[in-house]
Image (cartoon, rainbow, N blue to C red):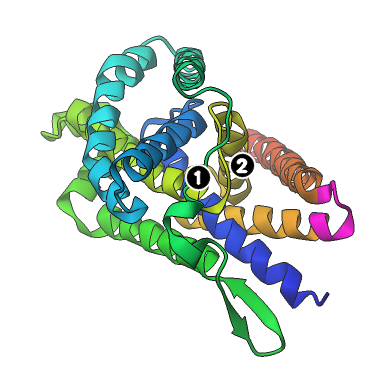
Amino acid sequence: MSWINILIPGILLGGYYALLASGLSFLFGVMRIINLAHGSLAVLAAYAIWIMADRHEINPFIGVLILLPFMAMLGWALHRLIFERSLKGGALIPILSTFGLAMLIDNLLFQNFGADTRSLAPYVDSLAYDSWELPGNVYVGQLSVIVFVTALLVLGGLHLLLAHTHLGRRIRAAAQDSDAAQLVGIDARRTYAIASAIALMLVALAGLSLALRTTFDPYAGPLQLIFAFEAVVIGGAGSLWGTLLGGVILGVAQSVGAHVHPQGFLIAGHLVFLIILIARLYVLDRLAVGLRRLRGGSQ
């Protein structure tokens, strides 16, 4: 197998990780919240779309459009009931709150759907396994390309929203300094709620992608959270295009690892994450020491 046949699937897999991590990165960038319920919320969205497809014969792509406003309302409610209140208690309380939310979602899904795995692949005909042949006997999955393009559109749309709209300027101002934003007439509380709604809409897209490309069960959320968290950290927390880069690096690492050893898929991804994390901590520590020395010498 040529390296092209290893790298291209890895890059396309990175598109899924970028889409999965986009809501986590966006919420952290705006509110500095690490949402440990992110993966479980994506699985919840996957189940909601599956119910519409299985019980009401609604095409999954139509189902996600129906789901988006409900996820936005859920995001608004979660902000008012959990995120906003927990932020007042310090950095640790939001982590504990969202961890508890994840446990609640996982167990409620298990209670209602059992441990059986499900997938949306049967409801999209041959899209789940069709591929295009490129020159050089290279094959790319159609669904993987669609997910990658969706990730580009989502991240590009978020960038345009933040850079060129009044709402985006409000979000950036509230993210920088909520107290200063309040002084110039920006309702930071409402802005944060809107940001949470947007983040949950992104979670719905991630849930659709998860359910189309693989099987899922009530306890699939924690693993998806790990993938999303690794993509965010590799690419730089709070950076939208960094999230895409982090997802691609993670996907390529996993693809190469799977080629090297059958059990190397997860190990290679985790190893790259740890290497980059340690390198960043080391570089940041050296920079902090250098800055302290410069300040000491200037006094």
Q: Which mark is residue 21?
A: 1
Residue 136 drawn at (x, y percent): 71, 89
Q: Residue 67 carries which label?
A: none
The correct choice, above or below, for 226 with respect to 208 in the image is above
Q: What residue type is labelled 1?
A: Ala
Q: Which residue is drawn at 42% across and 53% down?
A: 123
Q: Residue furthest toward the right? A: 261
Q: Are marks 2 and 1 in contact (CB under 8 Å)?
A: yes
Near mark 2 (Cα within 10 A), the count class, few <14, some 14-19 or many ≥20, is many
The quarter of the rendered structure image containing the C terminus is top right
Left or right of 192 in this view: 150? right
- Can residue 62 be seen at all in this image of the molecule? yes
Helix, strand or loop under label 1: helix
Q: What residue type is labelled 2?
A: Phe
Q: Residue furthest toward the bottom? A: 135
- Can residue 239 be seen at all in this image of the molecule? no
Q: Which residue is drawn at 19% across and 55% down?
A: 165
First to last magenta residue range: 258-264
First of labels 2, 1 by sequence position: 1
The correct choice, above or below, for 281 with respect to 212 in the image is above
| Quadrant of the image occupied by residue 184 | top left
Closest to the observer, 177 or 74: 74
